[in-house]
Image (cartoon, rainbow, N blue to C red):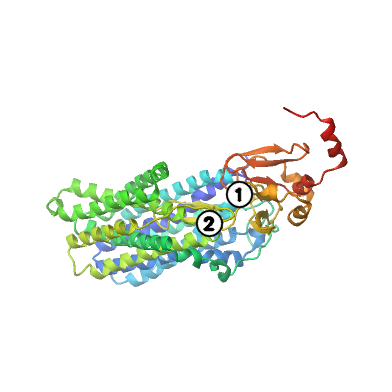
């Protein structure tokens, strides 16, 4: 059987590429954030040093929103818009893993380990943004949910398997062999992805034969990206949300530093035992988080967040107040497993809460800032535990975790948001979500995608009405009510600038979903001119016209004029 390596043409290849690249992202998290902290604790490294290590290596995930404009500015189109960045980041991640072989003595080389961990995550975060951007561009709207599921699964399996296996390998063989195995797996994934192309006819490698199949589009400057954010970012609801995100990240970072150290030094876990526990319960937590969606829709993100965070607070306080049970292995294992399980469950509630207020034209950057605040909070939380670890007991450390969590619940009570449709119309952001422990892979395209050719759609203002037009095929999207306002020759001349031949070719594409709400699209026929058909969403009632169709619609020929008299009226 011939394998179709073209991502834009093969759903199987998109699923395979997406899940494998997200698997690659899970490897750094499983090794550096789960197995290595426990291993360092078993080697006698102090809590402060371990916490500082975790605080530093997570920083690239806090600043990954800066990668998007860079990727738009610097492109090598003969290899695709995003694929060169994916290949470069994957290669960098592979080589940086090889650097870990120089860490022979972790007690004396924590600084080198931290630098290498930071470098690995720089490449991992860059690869995350590039893969998400590429997935949005080559995947039809009605496939994005399934692709996201494959990517989530890949990342979860990646960090779960890596944490379990590397936990045993670090103890048995040391960092050198573990690093070589991790680098080898990354290299295999890199070689597999090198076989793909975004579109047929593009180059696989810079020196291969092929040509650019996509157009370079003007990249927005940082000033353009952040223009208009002040109106929404500093509103009351946004400031309260940023405080919630900061505290949630702080709690996560504090717990990620405290829990492995307590597991090794206090509860007597070995590094493999801790890594395997996190792997199993992390997968269970991811499954629970994905199943939590309907409950969030029914009861609201705020209520579900308060519920899940309350469980985290009760868990921390209960663990502090049951010191007499710390010798009971079953009790301790159950409590630590519950903490791991609650992590992704709380995260999915946080994401839903942040999404709800991102309804502005700048929703892409707005959401990225919220996630960056959470990741900065995680770095601060890890560092904070390191600063107090030597001066507090484990009981006090758990009580402090509970107190911080209660404070977050109190702040959440002040969150007030009523979704309101702004003047004109409300725009829904186009996004792909990846729920995973390590970075929470999420990428917004920042523009609605053409349902036919998947290119960005620009917003065109005419007669005080904003219409979306595809950069590539020049198809037109009208939200409900807009078409009736612009069904004039003047509007058609200004909007319908595409090639009629391209429009006729695109008109044959009928297997797609609404680019606004992902609802089903139905083919409609104009009653006055039955030779003209267009597509309309059955949910939001928006309409899509291929190039040339709007011009044809507003132009009534002599034949059309007489047909109105000879065609019997339907009752």
Above/below status of 27 relative to 229: above
User: In the drawing, what numbered circle is on residue 7?
Assistant: 1
Name the one closer to the observer, 448 or 31: 448
Q: Secondary structure at mark 2?
A: strand
Above/below status of 492 relative to 175: above
The quarter of the image holding the C terminus is top right
The residue identified by callout 2 is 444
Q: Residue 479: x percent and y percent?
A: 63, 48
Q: Residue 242: x percent and y percent?
A: 40, 62
Name the one closer to the observer, 210 or 362: 362
Name the one closer to the observer, 457 or 432: 457
Q: Secondary structure at mark 1?
A: loop
Quadrant of the rendered image containing residue 257: bottom left
User: In the drawing, what numbered circle is on residue 300?
Assistant: none
Compared across the picture, whether 143 is left or right of 267 comes to right
- Separation of marks 1 and 2 at Cα, in angstroms: 20 Å
Q: Residue 202: x percent and y percent?
A: 67, 55
Quadrant of the rendered image containing residue 534: top right
Compared across the picture, whether 421 is left or right of 242 comes to right
The reply to whether callout 1 and callout 2 are in contact (CB within 8 Å) is no
Q: Residue at x 62, y 64 (%)?
A: 75
């Amino acid at each position: 059987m011939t394998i179709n390596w073209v991502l834009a043409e093969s759903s199987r290849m998109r699923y395979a590429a997406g899940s494998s690249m997200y698997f690659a992202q899970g490897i750094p998290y499983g090794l550096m954030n789960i197995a290595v902290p426990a291993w360092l604790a078993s080697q006698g490294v102090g809590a402060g040093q371990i916490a500082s290590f975790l605080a530093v290596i997570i920083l690239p995930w806090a600043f990954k929103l800066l990668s998007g404009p860079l990727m738009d500015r610097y492109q090598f189109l003969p290899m695709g818009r995003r694929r060169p960045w994916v290949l470069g980041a994957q290669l960098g991640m592979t080589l940086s893993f090889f650097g870990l072989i120089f860490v022979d003595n972790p007690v004396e080389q924590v600084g080198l380990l931290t630098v290498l961990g930071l470098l690995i995550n720089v490449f991992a975060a860059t690869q995350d943004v590039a893969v998400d951007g590429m997935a949005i561009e080559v995947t039809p709207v009605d496939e994005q949910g399934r692709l996201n599921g494959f990517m989530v699964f890949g990342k979860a399996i990646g960090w779960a398997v890596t944490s379990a296996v590397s936990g045993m390998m670090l103890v048995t063989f040391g960092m050198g062999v573990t690093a070589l195995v991790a680098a080898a797996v990354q290299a295999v994934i890199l070689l597999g992805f090198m076989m793909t192309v975004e579109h047929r006819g593009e180059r696989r490698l810079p020196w291969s034969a092929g040509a650019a199949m996509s157009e370079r589009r003007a990249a927005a400057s940082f000033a353009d990206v952040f223009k208009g954010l002040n109106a929404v970012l500093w509103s009351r609801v946004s400031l309260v949300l940023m405080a919630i995100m900061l505290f949630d990240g702080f709690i996560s970072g504090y717990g990620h530093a405290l829990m492995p150290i307590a597991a090794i030094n206090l509860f007597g876990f070995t590094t493999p035992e801790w890594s395997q526990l996190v792997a199993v319960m992390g997968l269970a937590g991811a499954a629970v988080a994905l199943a939590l969606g309907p409950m969030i829709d029914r009861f609201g993100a705020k209520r579900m967040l308060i519920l899940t965070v309350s469980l985290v607070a009760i868990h921390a306080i209960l663990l502090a107040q049951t010191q007499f049970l710390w010798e009971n292995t079953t009790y301790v294992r159950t409590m630590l497993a519950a903490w791991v399980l609650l992590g992704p469950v709380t995260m999915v509630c946080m994401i839903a809460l942040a999404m709800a207020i991102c309804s502005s034209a700048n929703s892409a950057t707005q959401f990225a800032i919220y996630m960056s605040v959470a990741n900065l909070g995680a770095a601060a939380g890890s560092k904070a535990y390191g600063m107090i670890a030597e001066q507090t007991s484990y009981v006090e450390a758990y009580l402090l975790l509970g107190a911080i969590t209660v404070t977050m619940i109190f702040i959440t009570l002040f969150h007030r948001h009523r979704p309101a449709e702004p003047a004109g119309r409300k725009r829904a952001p186009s996004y792909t979500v990846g729920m995973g422990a390590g970075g929470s892979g999420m990428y917004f395209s920042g523009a609605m995608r053409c349902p036919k050719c998947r290119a960005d759609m620009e917003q065109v203002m005419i007669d005080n009405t904003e219409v979306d037009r595809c950069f590539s095929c020049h198809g037109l999207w009208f939200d409900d009510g807009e078409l009736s306002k612009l069904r004039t020759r003047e509007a058609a001349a200004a909007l319908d600038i595409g090639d009629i031949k391209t429009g006729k070719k695109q008109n044959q594409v009928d297997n797609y979903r609404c680019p606004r709400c992902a609802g089903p699209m139905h083919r409609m026929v104009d009653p006055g001119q039955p030779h003209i058909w267009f597509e309309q969403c059955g949910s939001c009632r928006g309409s899509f016209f291929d190039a040339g169709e709007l011009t044809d619609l507003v132009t009534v020929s002599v034949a059309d004029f007489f047909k109105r008299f000879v065609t019997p009226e339907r009752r």
